[in-house]
Amino acid sequence: MEQLIINESWKRCQQSGSSPTDAALDLRLTGKELHDLLERNEPLLKHLRPVFEQIQRTVHDREYLAAVVNAEGFILSRAGGIRIRQIDERLEVGTNWSEENKGTNAMGVVLHERKSALIHGDHHFYEENHVLTCAASPLYDADGVFCGAVNISTTKENYHPLLLSWTKAVADSVHSKMTAEKLKQERPVMLESPPGKNNPENLYTFQNIAGSCENITAVKKLAKRAALTDYPVIIYGESGTGKELLAQSIHSGGDRAERIFVPLNCSALPESLIESELFGYEKGAFTGASQRGKAGKFEAADGGTIFLDEVGDLSLKAQSALLRVLQEKTITRIGGYKQISVNVRILSATNKNLRTEIAAGRFREDLYYRLKGIYLTMPPLRNRSDICEIAEFLLKKMESNSRILSEEAKAKLMHYSWPGNIRELESVLMQGSFLSEGKRIEAEAIQFEEEYEIKRSPVLSLEEAESETIRHALEAVDGNISKAAERLHVGRNTLYSKLKKYDISY
Ligand SMILES: Nc1ncnc2c1ncn2[C@@H]1O[C@H](COP(=O)(O)OP(=O)(O)OP(=O)(O)O)[C@@H](O)[C@H]1O
């Protein structure tokens, strides 16, 4: 069936007079045309954004690129990326991936057939796309009208058996969000929030933060105290450790709990939209601006909390714009003249070492000090002794009739390194639950992603291995030199000289 669809698509490309060795057509919209296209598609994009933000975090540093095209084949939004620059650029927002332009490809085939499609390597018509594997699924709006396709591309060596299911899940999720909004508009009174509450009542609180090991209880204790102040807080931690959950709990545990919590994913903020996102704009401020004008994130968060996620990824231009609001505590909408004062609590999070970013000239020191009133660090999962407790909590959250883990399954969870932290634990448990027929999840059902990945373990030089080991030891004890030296079975002075030798900051 799949092969038949591909053959038909190839036939159409050949009939149009193209040859696989030709360069594919590069039709792309820019400037006002692109702006208008995105504006017209805002009802879809607003539901897509949180899903793509999630993908952006999940595929961080991996070779996956998600894109959504409209029914004409123009890319409306993307997340993630592919390291081969020429390929990545071909998948920019505004480029057209219909079959007429790019030959046989997953998005083009879905637009034609309205069925999911997986196009691997040389099944693409044009040779320039043979390095890719792409999967795509149709996207329908709340009225069931076909409105485009969700695509995930990666290099062909990176092919993953779940690629196609992933695109289907994303398309379903966006469709459900659009349907839910339509229902809400039809029944506004029933679904409206209680009076006086600006927020959806589903923000996390400290009670929702599972786990009782020493590492997490210490952070929770500090965070509860931080919640009672109005100081800015910066939360450090690897991706998936629960930084956003902690930020929401700090908001929910403080005086602003009844007010709005506005999250802003700084890594997903395009350079050209920074000022309008932060400050908003007046009607007619620029070509393509909405007729009604729009409040920016700071104005929207007035009285409440703004959460700057992935703050270390802000461009320097965005950093100076942000610094201005933090210093002046007022904003002026683009195209406006009125200064609007804003009273906002700032919480931020990052998985980068901001000191290193400052030293490298990528982060402003003055902004750093504005953000860092109190700082907290979420421990990585591999340094927590309560992995099984969290797993049981997550299983309960997933299913009302929750499954239990066998002792062997628990041991397997305890001995894994968890590069993706709690987010990865959630997905491992989902798969484990899915594979288990009975009530108990056995060890065989606990499968780690690494088993699916091509193993590329580089051989390290002795010096590289030594410096890696020192870094890990320091990380495990939160930078405490005496404890790290103890773990490494060396004296403190030896450790200091190695830190100097390898230029390791602690
Ligand atoms: N202690 C916890 N108890 C229950 N669920 C948790 C806990 N910590 C994290 N999670 C879950 O793990 C996932 C990742 O959490 P979250 O998005 O807060 O991480 P993050 O550190 O902000 O990640 P990123 O840096 O990628 O944005 C979420 O689904 C969250 O519900």
Image (cartoon, helix red, strand yellow):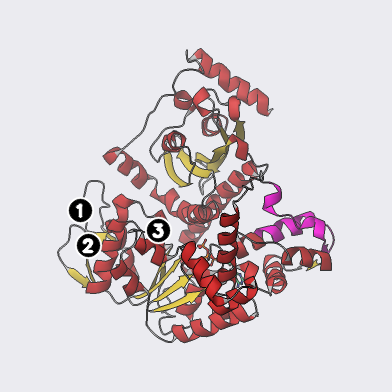
Q: Which residue is mark 1?
A: 285
Percent x, y of residue 300: 33, 68
Specify whether residue 436 is painted magenta.
yes
Q: Position of residue 128 (x, y in %)?
A: 49, 26
Q: CA distance from mark 3 to mark 1?
A: 27 Å
Residue 169 position within the rendered picture, expressed as x and y whole percent measured from the top left: 61, 49
Give the Cα separation between the discs numbered 3 and 2: 24 Å
Residue 360 visible in this rendered orientation of the protein: yes
Q: Which residue is mark 3?
A: 313
Verify CB contact (< 8 Å) between mark 2 and mark 1. yes
Name the quarter showing ligand 1: bottom right
Q: Tag 1, which secondary structure?
A: loop
Residue at disc 3, secondary structure: helix
Residue wearing tag 2: 333
Q: Residue furthest right?
A: 438
Marks 3/2 in contact by CB < 8 Å: the verdict is no
**Closer to the camera in the image, 55 or 388:** 388
Quarter in which the N terminus is drawn: top right
Q: In the rendered structure, which segment of residues is drawn in magenta?
A: 427-452
Q: Residue at x 43, y 62 (%)?
A: 310
At numbered mark 2, what does the secondary structure look like: helix, strand or loop?
loop
Mark toward the viewer: 3 or 2: 3
Amino acid residing under circle 1? Ala
Q: Position of residue 410 (x, y in %)?
A: 77, 67
